Image (spheres, rainbow, N blue to C red):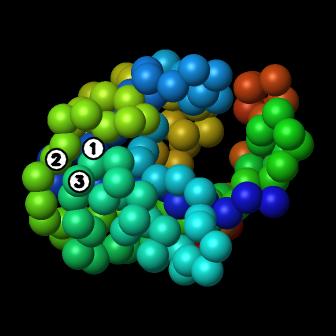
Amino acid sequence: MKLSTICYIDNGSQLLLLHRNKKENDIHQGKWVSVGGKFEIGETPEECAKREIYEETGLIAEKLELCGFITFPNFTQDGQDWYSFVYRVTEFSGNLIENCPEGTLEWVNYEDVMNKPTWEGDYIFLQWILDRRPYFSAKFTYVANQLIEQSVEFY
């Protein structure tokens, strides 16, 4: 089992997206995703989110809004389940770095976010983020990188 964060940085009209185009053998290669990543030992979800945001963007998250929790069963080639805390960040400081090790960072207008290539399930929960839906607990099941099943509860 892997624990991770998904962090959408929101400046009020755009989301900061990461075009994964730098790492070899990247399961997200070519896709536009949020920043975030795996927990380190002893981290809380918030500590992980803030660390990942800073490492990947140079920005300091001042306030995190927990939007939901997503289960990705058997998501990676090693057969591990991934459990992800999903955050929106509207209060941040610092300067965006120019050379993110994960890929290319870009501010994307809300109306253009859904036009960027990403995972099929990401389009679904991205819409929840953009619509400011209530807290959600979702499950997205992929087989051979294809979404085959999804479920969600809103609270």
Could you tell me if residue 28 is visible in this image?
A: yes
**Which quadrant: the N terminus?**
bottom right
Decide: is 144 above or below 98.
Answer: above
Q: Please give the residue where the numbered disc 1 appears in the rendered image.
A: 16
Q: What is the spatial separation of the Cα atoms under label 1 and label 2, in whole angstroms?
A: 10 Å
Q: What is the spatial separation of the Cα atoms under label 2 and label 3, in whole angstroms?
A: 5 Å
- Of labels 1 and 2, the one closer to you: 2
Q: Position of residue 140 (x, y in %)?
A: 73, 46
Q: Residue furthest right?
A: 79
Residue 87 location, quadrant: bottom left
Q: Please give the residue where the numbered disc 2 appears in the rendered image.
A: 96
Residue 102 location, quadrant: top left
Name the residue located 67 percent from the left edge and 63 percent from the top edge.
Answer: 3
Q: Which mark is residue 93?
A: none
Q: Residues within 10 Å of mark 3 (few under 14, many from 20)?
A: some
Instruction: Name the amino acid type tagged 2.
Output: Leu
Q: Residues within 10 Å of mark 2 (few under 14, many from 20)?
A: some
Instruction: Name the amino acid type tagged 3.
Output: Gly
- Left or right: residue 5 compared with residue 103: right
**Quick check: marks 2 and 3 in contact, CB under 8 Å?**
yes
Instruction: Name the amino acid type tagged 1.
Output: Leu
Q: Please give the residue where the numbered disc 3 appears in the rendered image.
A: 58
Q: Secondary structure at mark 1?
A: strand
Q: Residues within 10 Å of mark 1 (few under 14, many from 20)?
A: many
Quick one: label 2 or label 3, which is nearer the N terminus?
Answer: 3
Quick one: label 1 or label 3, which is nearer the N terminus?
Answer: 1
**Quick check: marks 1 and 2 in contact, CB under 8 Å?**
yes
Name the residue located 64 percent from the left edge and 22 percent from the top edge.
Answer: 25
Decide: is 8 above or below 46.
Answer: above
- Left or right: residue 33 compared with residue 144: left
- Left or right: residue 61 compared with residue 44: left
- Of labels 1 and 3, the one closer to you: 3
